[in-house]
Amino acid sequence: MIKRTRRSLLLVFSSILALILIILAASFYFMLAGVVNRDEHNRMEKTGKKTADEWVRHTTGKGYGVKEEFDRLRIGVMEWEFLQYDQFAVVFDTAGSMISSSSDDRNPLIDAEIQERLVGRMSGSDFFRLEKTAPEGRSVYALFRISPGDGKGSVIFIGEDISNQIHLLREMKWLIAGLSGVLLLVASGIGYVFAGSAMVPIMRSLKRQQEFTADASHELRTPLSVLQSSVEILEEEQSRLPAVHRTVLHHMKDEIIRMIRLTEQLLTLARSDSGGTPLLRSETFDLRDTLQAVTTRMQTTIAKEKGIDISLDDMLPEEDVSYAGDRDQISQVLYILLDNAVKYSFPNGTVMIQARRNNGDGVELIVADQGCGIPEENLPYLFERFFRVDKARSREWGGTGLGLSIAAQIIRLHGGRIEVKSTVNRGSTFTVRLP
Ligand code: ADP
C-alpha cells in the first residue's frame, strides 16, 4: 500500500510537472516562432517597398530630378544590388510574363518551375512560403508580393531564403523538448525521493497500528479460549439452568465464537499486512481433494443446519486439476466462499462448487449459490475490510466482514484473481482464477 501511495504521489506530481513544462515549452516555442515570423514580415515589407520605389524610378523616372540621369537610366537595366545576399526579386507583367529578375547575379531560385508557381500567386495573401527540394537539401523561401504602381500593373515578388531560420527553429524545438524531458526526469527522481521521505512517518504509524492489531488479537486469544471452555463447562450443566439462563448461555457462546473468529481473522490480516505471512509453502495437490474436504466439513455444520445441499459439480474425471500453491491457504479461501454461499443461501437451497482447468494453463474454482445475492452497487466494495451488505444478516450468521478480504489477499499472493457475478434474490457466483 505504501509503495502504491508513493507511486501515485509520484504520478500526480510528475503529471502536474509535465503539464506545466509542456505549457511553458510550447509557449516559449510559439513566442520565439512569432518573433522570428514578425521580424521576417517586417524585413520583407521594407525590402518590398524599397524594390517598388526602385522599380518605379527605373521604369518611369519618377523620383529623379535630373532629366539627363533619367534618360541614362531608362536605357540601362534595373540594378538589384540593394538586395541582401539571401534575397531575390522577380517582376511580372499583367500577362504573367517575367520582365525582370535579380536571378542573374542572385539566388538561382527563379527557375521555370518557380516562375510558374509565382504566377499562380498573383492574387491571394501577400505573404507566403515556397519550398524547393534540391539534391543539396531542402530550401524554404519567404515571399512577399507588392504592386509597385508603375502604371502598367506590374507585380513584384520579393523572396528571402529562410532555410536557416527554419532549421534554427526546428533545432530549438528539439532542444526545448529534450531539456523539458531531462528536467522532468530529474524532478521526478527528486520527487520520488521526497515522496519516500514523506512516507516514513506514515509507514511508522502504520507499522505501529499493525503491531497493535496483531498484539491485541494475539492477547485476546487466550482469554477468549478460557471463556469458550468455561461456557462449554456451563453447557454440560445446562439442564439444571432455567430456560432464560440457557438462552443467555447460548448467546454468549455464539458471541464468543464470533469474537474468536474475528480475532483470528484480524491476526491473519495484520500479519499479512506487515509481510508476516511467509509466502506460500508451495506443494502440488489435487484441488478435487481440497474441495471434497471443505465440503464434508461444511456439510456437517452450518449447511446441515439450513438444509443446504452442496454439490460438487461437473468434474470431468480425466481433467487434471492439480495445483501448486499453499494448500492450507487455498482451503481457507474455499472455506470462506463456501461458508458465505451457505450463510447467504435461502434454507434448503443448493450450492454448487467446481474446480476446472481454464483455457490458459491455470485452474478455476467456482462457488455458486442461489441465495439472496448482492446488489450491483455493492460489488466494488465487496473485498474491502469490514464491508457487509446486510450487517444484521451477516451478524446473525456470525459474519465479521473480513472473510472476503482475507480470501482476496490469499488469491493475490498466489498471483490469481477473484471475480463475482450476482443477482439479487437469484444468487451469486464467485470465480477464483489461479495461474
Ligand atoms: P462476512 O463475514 O460478513 O460474511 P465477508 O467478507 O465474507 O464477510 O463478506 C462480506 C459481505 O459480502 C457479506 O457481509 C455479505 O453481505 C456479502 N456476501 C459475501 N458472500 C455472499 C454471497 N455468497 N451471497 C450474498 N452476499 C454475500
Image (cartoon, rainbow, N blue to C red):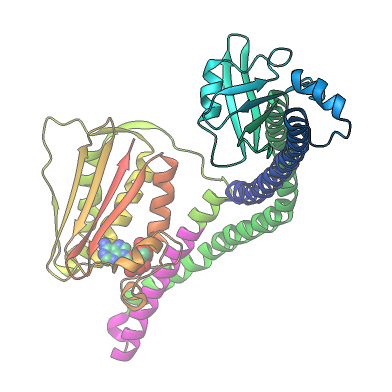
Q: Position of residue 68 (x, y in %)?
A: 86, 25
Q: Nearer the viewer, residue 394 or 295?
A: 394
Q: Nearer the viewer, residue 26 or 18?
A: 26
Relative side of 410 to 218, left or right: left
Relative side of 66 to 20, left or right: right
Q: Position of residue 383 (x, y in %)?
A: 40, 59
Quarter of the rendering occupied by the C terminus: top left
Asked if residue 261 can be seen in this view, the reply is yes
Residue 55, picture quadrant = top right
Q: Nearer the viewer, residue 104 or 332?
A: 104
Residue found 74% across the figure and 33% down from its top = 56
- Does the segment drawn in magenta span residue 395? no
Q: Above or below — where is 228 with respect to 92?
A: below
Q: Above or below — where is 279 with respect to 237?
A: above
User: Where is ligand 1, by quadrant?
Assistant: bottom left
Q: Above or below — where is 391 with respect to 415?
A: below
Question: Looking at the image, which residue sits at the far right?
Answer: 66
Q: Above or below — where is 211 with respect to 55?
A: below
Asked if residue 290 can be seen in this view, the reply is no
Q: Position of residue 366 (x, y in %)?
A: 23, 48
Q: Over which residues does the magenta segment extend?
A: 238-266
Residue 373, picture quadrant = bottom left
Residue found 39% across the figure and 38% down from its top = 326
Residue found 56% across the figure and 45% down from its top = 275
Q: Main secondary structure of the magenta part?
A: helix
Relative side of 176 to 367, left or right: right
- Does the segment drawn in magenta span residue 256? yes
Q: Position of residue 35 (x, y in %)?
A: 75, 42
